[in-house]
Image (cartoon, grey):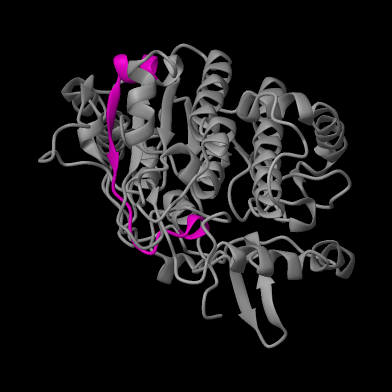
């Protein structure tokens, strides 16, 4: 009788092996994913550039894969949405509600330890899927991951309100020993920042514009340098550690769209009176940012294995915007209080070949769906406490038949999320930037009334 029970148990294990191991734990499927986040990208701009051959790398992904809008929510604050993308949960659950934390001592920067739940890199890493995370919002101090991380820290004394990596800043990488290599890479990119900036500004004279125009040009150049650092470190570290899941974030499209919209589309607001010389000098900065990101997409996709699932996602779109009391020379593009979808592209194993951009009745993915869908790709279950779902519309019927959804579990939060100890010296390294963080965000309108 004991032998019969043993044979029956082994038979059931073999039958269930496609979705679970014999101890009841889900098994991960062999998979490779490259996830590129492009803050603020919209089909309104990317579509015409693709059609004219100016974004060939994104077009190549669309031509062999899936394209749609990506539904988002309001107010569309980037750190909030990118944390939702990484967790599948709303801000009330993941705990990131703004760019800063309000404390009795005044606004403080939001840090990685402030996130209350696990991100996709935790969920995969804890289940033996190695990950690489580069430049993602609110990842300083660098988290202890199964793989590598290059964190993103806002130090606005450097003229940047998006995050970046800086020489000598503590806790920017995991493993910690990679910080010296990151320092060398940052130094190299800083040395050629002027040449990099030509991709957006061409031969624009250094002294061009009013004081406000000089400031927004500096912001945009700094954001481009940050993205260059992140893309180059992603490529360099991925060659060192071929993790099956790599995610890299880019912010230049968002920054240029905030700052340069009136030069790109000067007729969007009848109140604007944009001199022709400014249109000539700055009118191509936004499309140049899209062209530059497209080149970077091509470079990093070229580093991926042919059987890699490629995802490109944007957290929201953009439009012309004027805010009471805010100079249009400082900011003329926005998104926070208009429900503007981002874009979504996927190509690779199991992906449907369909373009839903023009189908208003199509069921499209949302920012909540990306983490559950990524879990499915790796053979892991969605958790019932995630607001998002597995977006099955991304996959072919053949894929879904061969890779059925794993039965969901109640939660992945069965123990406290690991955090990183921050010393007084670490805090001192970022505290000097606090006032600049707050003032720069207020100048962009994010902190109105605070």
Instruction: Judge left or right: residue 404 versus residue 50.
Output: left
Q: Nearer the viewer, residue 413 or 301?
A: 301
Q: Count the marks: how many?
A: 0
Q: Residue furthest left?
A: 361
Residue at the image point whose x is 88% and y is 37% from the top: 180
Horizontal and vertical percent position of residue 367: 35, 49
Instruction: Judge left or right: residue 260 versus residue 154.
Output: left
Where is 163 relative to 420, above or below?
above
Residue at the image point whose x is 43% and y is 52% from the top: 272
Residue at the image point whose x is 65% and y is 48% from the top: 213
Q: Quadrant of residue 102?
A: bottom right
- The answer to whether residue 74 is magenta is yes
Q: Is residue 218 visible?
A: yes
- The answer to whether residue 148 is magenta is no
Q: Residue furthest bottom?
A: 104
Q: Nearer the viewer, residue 392 or 45?
A: 45
Horizontal and vertical percent position of residue 228: 68, 31
Q: Quadrant of the N terminus?
A: top left
Q: Is residue 24 visible?
A: no
Where is 275 relative to 297, above or below?
below
The magenta span reads 59-80
Residue at the image point whose x is 13% and y is 40% from the top: 360
Horizontal and vertical percent position of residue 245: 53, 32
Where is 220 relative to 398, above or below?
below
Q: Quadrant of the C terminus?
A: bottom right
């Amino acid at each position: 009788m004991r032998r019969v029970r043993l044979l029956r148990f082994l038979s059931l294990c073999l039958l269930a092996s496609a979705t679970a191991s014999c101890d009841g734990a889900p098994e991960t499927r062999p998979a490779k994913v490259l996830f590129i986040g492009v803050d603020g990208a919209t089909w309104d701009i990317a579509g015409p550039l693709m059609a004219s051959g100016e974004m060939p790398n994104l077009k190549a992904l669309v031509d062999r894969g899936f394209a749609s809008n990506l539904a988002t929510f309001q107010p569309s604050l980037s750190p909030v949405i990118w944390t939702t993308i990484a967790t599948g949960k709303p801000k009330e659950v993941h705990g990131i509600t703004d760019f800063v934390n309000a404390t009795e001592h005044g606004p403080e920067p939001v840090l990685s330890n402030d996130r209350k739940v696990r991100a996709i890199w935790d969920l995969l890493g804890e289940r033996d899927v190695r990950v690489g995370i580069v430049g993602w919002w609110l990842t300083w101090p660098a988290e202890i991951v199964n793989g590598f991380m290059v964190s993103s820290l806002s130090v606005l004394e450097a003229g940047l309100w998006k995050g970046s990596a800086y020489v000598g800043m503590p806790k920017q990488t995991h493993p910690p020993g990679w910080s010296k290599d990151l320092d060398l890479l940052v130094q190299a990119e800083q040395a050629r920042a002027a040449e990099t900036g030509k991709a957006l500004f061409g031969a624009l004279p250094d002294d061009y514009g009013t004081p406000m125009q000089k400031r927004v040009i500096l912001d945009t150049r700094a954001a481009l340098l940050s993205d260059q650092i992140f893309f180059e470190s992603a490529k360099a570290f991925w060659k060192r550690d071929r993790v099956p899941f790599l995610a890299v974030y880019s912010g230049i499209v968002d920054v240029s769209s905030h700052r340069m919209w009136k030069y790109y589309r000067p007729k969007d607001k009848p109140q604007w009176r944009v001199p022709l010389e400014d249109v000539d000098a700055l009118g191509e900065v936004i499309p140049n940012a899209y062209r530059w990101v497209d080149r970077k997409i091509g470079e990093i996709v070229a580093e991926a294995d042919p059987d890699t699932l490629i995802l490109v996602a944007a957290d929201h779109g953009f439009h012309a915007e004027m805010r009471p009391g805010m100079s249009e020379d400082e900011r003329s593009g926005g998104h926070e209080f208009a429900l503007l979808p981002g874009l979504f592209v996927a190509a690779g194993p199991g992906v449907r070949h369909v373009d839903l951009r023009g189908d208003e009745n199509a069921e499209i993915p949302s920012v909540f769906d990306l983490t559950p869908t990524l879990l499915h790709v790796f053979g892991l279950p969605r958790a019932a406490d995630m607001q998002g779902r597995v977006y099955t519309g991304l996959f072919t019927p053949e894929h879904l038949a061969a890779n059925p959804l794993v039965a969901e579990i109640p939660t992945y939060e069965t123990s406290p999320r690991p955090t990183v100890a921050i010393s007084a010296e670490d805090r001192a390294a970022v505290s000097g930037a606090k006032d600049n963080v707050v003032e720069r965000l207020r100048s962009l309108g994010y902190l109105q009334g605070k």
